[in-house]
Image (cartoon, rainbow, N blue to C red):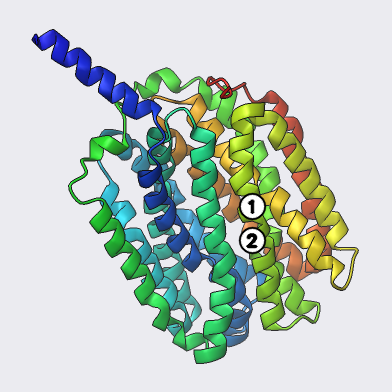
């Protein structure tokens, strides 16, 4: 066999690997996402406890979660590096680091210590989330939507169990005792380390294109996506960060508030699992239009109902409000297929910075006019995401047949 034949065979094998859906590797990353986001999901149900312990205002509580978003400024840099070199050790150890920092929240003696812990948590979150969607896109072959659905479903499942685990832990050991759960994060990192042993970084990244060639998309794609993100953030911040606090203020117990958040997130698991795969077949935009409109209507409805029917509406709200994320991630990967990690890093920077602003804004509105009226405003503002979607360019990839 000639050198040329050998090179051709290697290229064909490489192409075959790129086009195939690597189920085992995808599920490994999905499992790490599940464990990692289980710990970050402790934050929302713990906020009422932290508010009581340190006598915080809603603005101060929102500021804490905003500090967790600020390290997102590192996302484009982390994404750029991930396109150039292997950052799999960031992914491997992030669950352990995040778990440790979350476990220390209950021991924080003052607000300044909480600010430091939330900032460090944000760095760990960025280190995990910036490279992993691009890794999924690389090993999902032509089924990027399916890969993103599994990836986001893993995160949503973690955010479903997280509130329940946090409520149980506080009930058993008090706020100061949640550090006892840290070992699960370290076990997850050990599993990831074992699974990734001997794997070269090139298997999880592709040759990066020239970023200068992608600069026009800062205007044509990322500018409209900024308004999509802004609209969604008002709704998502309200229902995922402030929902337990809102229900607590409305008279619900700490346990019921945590269970309500779990119901919302559990429905989001189903939405995340289905939306990306459906978008591979029907197209990205039609799926997003439906979910955006339904989310706003359901949040309005949730605020008007009482009793057990509220759980039904909450489940539907979770399904529709959390299902667009895999589709949006797939759209980002579709638009910049040669710089996927950098594109994801830029998108996450934008999303997290917008979320930081919205976290403080929603908290400040809650202090001044109450969370119920703030939720109504958020449901209305979220509708700006729909016209912004019309301006977005169509994806470069064609829907799977």
What is the distance, in whole Å, between disc 2 and disc 1 at their CAs? 7 Å
Q: Position of residue 204 (x, y in %)?
A: 31, 38
- Residue under pointer 2: 266
Q: Nearer the viewer, residue 61 or 125?
A: 125
Q: Residue furthest bottom?
A: 173
In the figure, 109 relative to 317: above or below? below
Q: Nearer the viewer, residue 362 or 86?
A: 86
- Residue under pointer 1: 270
Q: Is residue 193 left or right of residue 166?
A: left
In the figure, 14 relative to 315: above or below? above
Q: Is residue 43 left or right of residue 210?
A: right
Task: Please tell me whether mark 2 sits on a helix, a strand or a loop.
Answer: helix
Disc number for residue 56? none
- Which of the 4 quarters of the picture holds residue 77? top left
> Crowding at label 1, few (<14), some or many (≥20) Cα neighbours within 10 Å?
some
Q: Are marks 2 and 1 in contact (CB under 8 Å)?
A: yes
Q: Residue furthest left?
A: 2
Q: Residue sitting at 39 percent across and 20 percent down?
A: 212
Q: Is residue 142 visible?
A: yes
> Crowding at label 2, few (<14), some or many (≥20) Cα neighbours within 10 Å?
many
């Amino acid at each position: 066999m000639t050198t040329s034949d050998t090179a051709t065979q290697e290229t064909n094998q490489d192409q075959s690997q790129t086009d195939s859906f690597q189920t085992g590797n995808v599920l490994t990353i999905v499992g790490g996402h599940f464990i990692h986001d289980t710990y970050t999901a402790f934050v929302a149900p713990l906020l009422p406890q932290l508010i009581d312990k340190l006598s915080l205002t809603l603005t101060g509580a929102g500021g804490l979660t905003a500090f967790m978003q600020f390290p997102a400024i590192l996302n484009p840099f982390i994404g750029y590096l991930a396109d150039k070199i292997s950052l799999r050790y960031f992914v491997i150890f992030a669950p352990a680091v995040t778990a440790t920092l979350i476990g220390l929240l209950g021991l924080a003696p003052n607000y300044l210590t909480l600010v430091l812990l939330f900032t460090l948590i944000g760095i760990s979150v960025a280190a995990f989330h910036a490279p992993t969607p691009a890794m999924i896109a690389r090993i999902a072959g032509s089924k990027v939507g399916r890969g993103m659905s599994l990836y986001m479903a893993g995160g949503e499942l973690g955010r479903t169990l997280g509130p329940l685990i946090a409520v149980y832990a506080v009930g058993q050991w008090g706020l100061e005792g949640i550090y006892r759960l840290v070992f699960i994060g370290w076990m997850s990192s050990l599993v990831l380390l074992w699974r990734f042993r001997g794997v070269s970084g090139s298997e999880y990244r592709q040759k990066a294109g020239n970023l200068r060639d992608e600069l026009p998309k800062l205007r044509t794609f990322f500018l409209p996506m900024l308004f999509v993100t802004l609209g969604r953030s008002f709704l998502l911040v309200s229902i995922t960060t402030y929902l337990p606090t809102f229900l607590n203020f409305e008279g619900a117990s700490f346990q019921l508030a945590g269970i309500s958040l779990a119901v919302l997130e559990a429905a989001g698991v189903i939405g995340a699992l289905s939306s990306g795969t459906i978008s591979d077949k029907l197209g990205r935009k039609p799926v997003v239009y439906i979910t955006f409109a339904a989310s706003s209507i359901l949040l309005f409805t949730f605020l008007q109902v009482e009793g057990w029917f509220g759980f039904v509406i909450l489940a539907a709200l979770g399904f529709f409000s959390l299902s667009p994320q895999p589709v949006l991630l797939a759209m980002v990967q579709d638009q910049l297929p040669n710089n996927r990690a950098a594109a994801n890093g830029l998108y996450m920077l934008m999303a997290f910075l917008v979320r930081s602003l919205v976290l403080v804004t929603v908290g400040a509105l809650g202090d001044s006019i109450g969370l119920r009226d703030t939720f109504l405003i958020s449901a209305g503002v979220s509708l700006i995401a729909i016209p912004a979607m019309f301006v977005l360019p169509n994806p470069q990839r064609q829907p799977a047949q």
